[in-house]
Image: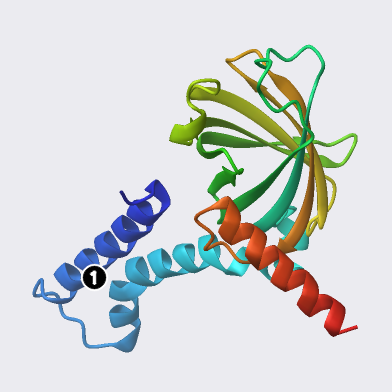
Amino acid sequence: MRRPAFVVRLALIGAGAVYSVLLYVSGLELDSWTVRLLALLPLLGAGLLTLWDMYLWKLPGVQRLTRRPRIDGLWEVTLKPTDESHIPPEGNRGPLRAYLVVSQSFWTAHVRQVTAESSSRSRAFFWERDGVADVDTLAFVYANEPRSGVEHRSRMHLGTCRIDVVNLKPTDMSGVYFTDRYTKGDMELRLIDRSRGHATFQAAEKHAAASLASSRSDR
């Protein structure tokens, strides 16, 4: 299923293209380059909005003006459940290792978390800014689906997460989570790199190990 951002971008470009074509062939006298340019403005505007959403906002000078943090990429996560969390006796009380894969544009963010026992996907999100503390917060709702081997003690559930971001290009973040299984805890996140194509915990862990080895060899 296509994400909403893709559909919006496609609709913008399609609507601009149709408008420009209809205006160009409508029988109006379009003899000057100025008028021809006016006919192309909707298409150009749609293309510019798409470029802005996907790429332009990340430029260093532009990002300082928009104040939108860039957090896309692969993050190593440590989850620390509280003592009050309702975890079954045979369950893992942590700390738990996980990886967060963030896909981000200016107007959208999609978060996927993988652990050795389950995977989670965000369903809705919003950015919140604390002007006094100069901290941006990404809050999102997610759905978690356990692997079949642990379903007897770890059922499918919904949760919410809040991640605090203290600069425009963070390499470390912290957060908290709460689920409808009455579990909650703290999160510590460390950026691995900007990659996103990791379907499983094992794949993310392998890439993280290779990335760490590569960075050490470059020193």
Q: How many marks?
A: 1
Say what secondary structure mark 1 lies in: helix
Residue drawn 45% across and 64% down? 50
Q: Quadrant of residue 16?
A: bottom left
Q: Position of residue 36 (x, y in %)?
A: 28, 81
Q: Position of residue 63 (x, y in %)?
A: 72, 62
Compared with residue 30, is residue 105 higher up or lower down, i.e. above or below? above
Q: Is residue 183 rendered to the left or right of residue 40?
A: right
The quadrant in which the C terminus is found is: bottom right
Judging from the image, the colouring scheme is rainbow
Compared with residue 75, is residue 90 higher up or lower down, i.e. above or below? above
Q: Nearer the viewer, residue 89 or 86?
A: 89
Residue drawn 79% across and 75% down? 213
Q: Nearer the viewer, residue 125 or 193?
A: 193
Q: Position of residue 212 (x, y in %)?
A: 78, 70
Q: Nearer the viewer, residue 144 or 95?
A: 95
Q: Which residue is mark 1?
A: 20
Q: Is residue 172 rendered to the left or right of residue 45?
A: right
Residue drawn 31% across and 75% down? 40
Q: Amino acid at mark 1?
A: Ser
Q: Position of residue 148 (x, y in %)?
A: 44, 33
Classify mark 1: residues with Cα within 10 Å, few (<14), some (14-19) or many (20+): many
Q: Is residue 67 visible?
A: yes
Q: Is residue 144 visible?
A: no
Q: Is residue 105 rendered to the left or right of residue 9?
A: right
Compared with residue 48, is residue 204 higher up or lower down, i.e. above or below? above
Q: Quadrant of residue 138?
A: top right
Compared with residue 21, is residue 170 higher up or lower down, i.e. above or below? above
Q: Nearer the viewer, residue 193 or 107?
A: 193
Residue drawn 28% across and 73% down? 39
